Image (tube, coloured by chain):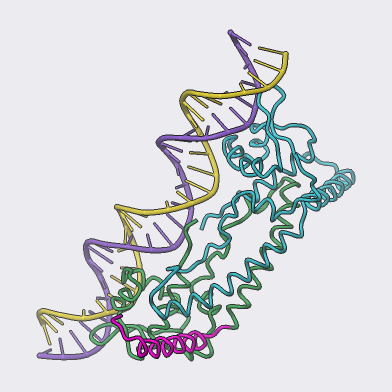
Chain colours: A cyan, B green, C purple, D yellow
Amino acid sequence: MRRDSRLSGALHVLLHMAERGQPMTSDELALCMSTNPVVVRRMMAGLREAGFVQSEKGHGGGWTIACDLKAVSIKDIYDALGAPTVFALGNRTEAPGCLVEQALNSALDSAFHDAEALLLARLGTISLADLSDDFNRRFAAHRSQSRKKPRAV
Amino acid sequence: MRRDSRLSGALHVLLHMAERGQPMTSDELALCMSTNPVVVRRMMAGLREAGFVQSEKGHGGGWTIACDLKAVSIKDIYDALGAPTVFALGNRTEAPGCLVEQALNSALDSAFHDAEALLLARLGTISLADLSDDFNRRFAAHRSQSRKKPRAV
DNA sequence: TCTCATGTAACTTCGTATGCTACATGAAGC
DNA sequence: GCTTCATGTAGCATACGAAGTTACATGAGA
């Protein structure tokens, strides 16, 4: 099944903005992600409402980060995106009359609920600053490796 | 996002078959699930290949359970269905050149991987017999309740 | 007032599960 | 043998939601 990549996309955009340190337009961000500026705006709408980013119109406008990267977790971004459905698997019927299905849903729901809780808890422990730090480590490693073995990228 | 209900459907069908104790046709099973017999056959194909059920053609034919309910877990059924994608969320790009996306995927993959492992481990602890027992408990409770407050179902 | 940017509605595209039709295959009953 | 009943499966239609695109309104600066 095709996967919802909005969380991944939003985080990607945020990290690029954090690196840049100045306003970036939807067009620039769309280029970073090889997608469409409207997709970027649509994705960012929730983050703007949650106060994580700001947008300015006109010359010199664009998107800027409006929060402390250390204080915002991946889970916060997930919530700002509207907490999209986590699982591709699910029950056939949510409120079944069939007792077989009730027994089944009860067991499945419990397992899915716990897995979702674990996932969101994990995402809650990772801040945007953590991601940015990880990127910078990779960037430093990449540069030192490029110095040893210089080649075009 | 619309959810994949094959796991739920397959388990539902198996429990109905376990209750019945004799061959059930695709048409009967489709009726139980208010779906189409072809959908049932398609869903059951993997279970047949895995040896969990048998199918017979012709008069008196249909589907029968061919395994020990205590020995088969929900995870086994999931695998027999081809281990469909668990998450509706995912990375935009699996093998990105962008270092930002690499850092991101690394963090997300780790969390998703752990959540999936937890889910499948949980599904591995629940046998078809457990589900069947749970159904029978519900059925008994339902009947005793009906005796107290008799009414048409 | 012109240009650049966001905001948003409306439509198209694309992938996948599901629903359905049609027909081949094979087993049981007559 | 022939009919009936069942699975097996290909092939197409449908539904749905994310992503992609077009078009245009709105507002901020030069």
Which residue is nearer to you in this view: B126 or A76? A76
Front-most of residues B53 and A92: A92
Task: Name the residue at 71% across, 59% down.
Answer: A123
Task: Name the residue rendered at 38%, 77% in the picture.
Answer: A98
Say which quarter of the image contains residue D5: bottom left
Point out the residue furthest to the front here. Answer: B149
**Residue C19 rendering spot, x and y as whole percentages:** 32, 62
A28 over B112 or under it: above or below? above
Q: How many marks?
A: 0
Measuring 75% from the left and 39% from the top, which residue is drawn there? A65
Nearest the viewer among B146 and B31 is B146
Vertical position of residue D8 compared to residue A68: above or below: below
| Image quarter (top left, top right, bottom left or bottom right) of the C terminus of chain A | top right
Main secondary structure of the magenta stretch: helix
Q: Using residue A61 as the reference point, say whether residue B87 is left or right of it.
A: left
Horizontal and vertical percent position of residue B143: 38, 89
- Is residue B134 rendered magenta in the image? yes
Where residue A77 sits in the image (x, y, percent)?
Answer: 68, 50
Residue A104 position, x and y percent, is 48, 78
Residue B142, image quadrant: bottom left
Q: Which residues are magenta?
A: B126-153
Q: Is residue B11 left or right of residue A46?
A: left
A118 inside magenta stretch: no
The front one of B48 and A50 is: A50
Q: Quadrant of residue C11?
A: top left
